[in-house]
């Protein structure tokens, strides 16, 4: 069983970031009656996919992705979903202090014992990296003895080379269908991948099964913090 928490705060920049990376963990916490808040910074309105077959335009995609995010939250059982209103693919240009303050305000309000986001330097996408840096800056301002734990998703090619093996591996087999439903909710972006994933699960392909059996995190190493 995943260790219970006082309150879990999940922060990601795009709808579907949570579904792929941590929806099994989110569902498990919620099923254990752990209070959980998901702050999604943008609506992913610049997403490359407009449906398969196409059912969206650049103008209609924000509303579609908003509805998909709500549906994914429902699949996971999330009741406290925050849409923070920033613009997709611009987070790296947002003011660093304002980004940090936004995260700090959430922490001050919710007093989480665990924060989940991306690991700075190992999150690949510029919006992912900007989010990770804001989380680190906000957490760094908190006294060490009061600071929430930080479980970070890292998936750059050099992750294990530099960070080692994941520190936290959550068994999510008991919420496999909730995770699949969260990913299905984001259908405008996930149709092609889901088709391959579902076929792989049917034939017990190890690469497919890893998506619905485990979710892995690194705990942030404050002793080597290099976020400026």
Image (tube, rainbow, N blue to C red):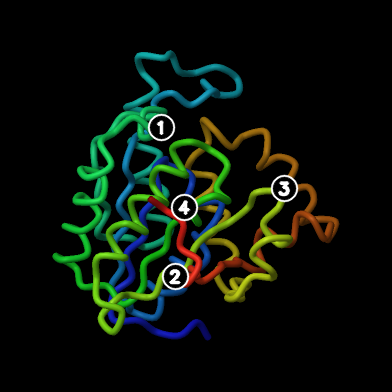
SS class, disc 4: helix
User: Which numbered disc flags the more N-terminal residue, 2 or 3?
Assistant: 3
Instruction: Determine the image quadrant of residue 184.
Output: top right
User: Which numbered disc flags the more N-terminal residue, 2 or 1?
Assistant: 1
Q: Nearer the viewer, mark 3 or mark 1?
A: 1
Residue lying at 43% horizontally and 56% vertically, measured from the top left = 75
User: Which numbered disc flags the more N-terminal residue, 3 or 1?
Assistant: 1
Q: CA distance from mark 2 to mark 3?
A: 36 Å
Number of the label disc, if any, that sits on residue 18: 4
| Along the viewing direction, whichever of 36 and 205 lies nearer the viewer | 36
Residue lying at 53% horizontally and 86% vertically, measured from the top left = 1
Residue 134 versus residue 46 in the image, above or below = below
Q: Nearer the viewer, mark 2 or mark 3?
A: 2
Badge 4 vs badge 3, beta-carbon distance below 8 Å: no
Residue lying at 48% horizontally and 44% vertically, measured from the top left = 16
What is the crowding at mark 3: few (fewer than 14 residues within 10 Å), some, or many (at least 20)? some
Q: Left or right: where does residue 202 sit relative to residue 190?
A: right
Badge 3 vs badge 1, beta-carbon distance below 8 Å: no
SS class, disc 3: helix
């Amino acid at each position: 069983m995943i260790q219970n928490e006082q309150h879990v705060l999940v922060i990601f920049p795009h709808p579907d970031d949570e579904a792929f990376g941590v929806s099994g963990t989110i569902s498990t916490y919620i099923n254990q009656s752990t209070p959980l808040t998901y702050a999604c910074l943008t609506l992913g309105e610049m997403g490359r996919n407009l449906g398969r077959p196409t059912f969206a335009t650049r103008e209609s995609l924000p509303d579609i992705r908003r509805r998909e995010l709500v549906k994914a939250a429902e699949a996971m059982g999330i009741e406290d979903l925050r849409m923070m209103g920033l613009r997709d693919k611009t987070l790296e240009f947002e003011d660093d202090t304002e980004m940090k303050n936004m995260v700090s305000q959430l922490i001050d309000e919710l007093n989480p014992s665990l924060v989940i986001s991306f690991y700075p330097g190992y999150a690949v996408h510029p919006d992912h990296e900007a989010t990770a840096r804001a989380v680190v800056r906000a957490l760094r301002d908190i006294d060490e003895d009061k600071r929430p734990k930080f479980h970070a998703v890292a998936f750059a090619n050099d992750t294990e080379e530099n960070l080692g093996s994941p520190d936290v591996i959550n068994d999510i087999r008991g919420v496999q269908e909730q995770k699949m439903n969260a990913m299905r909710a984001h259908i405008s972006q996930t149709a092609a991948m889901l088709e391959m994933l579902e076929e792989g699960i049917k034939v017990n392909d190890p690469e497919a099964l890893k998506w619905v059996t485990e979710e892995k995190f690194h705990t942030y190493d404050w002793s080597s913090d290099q976020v400026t």
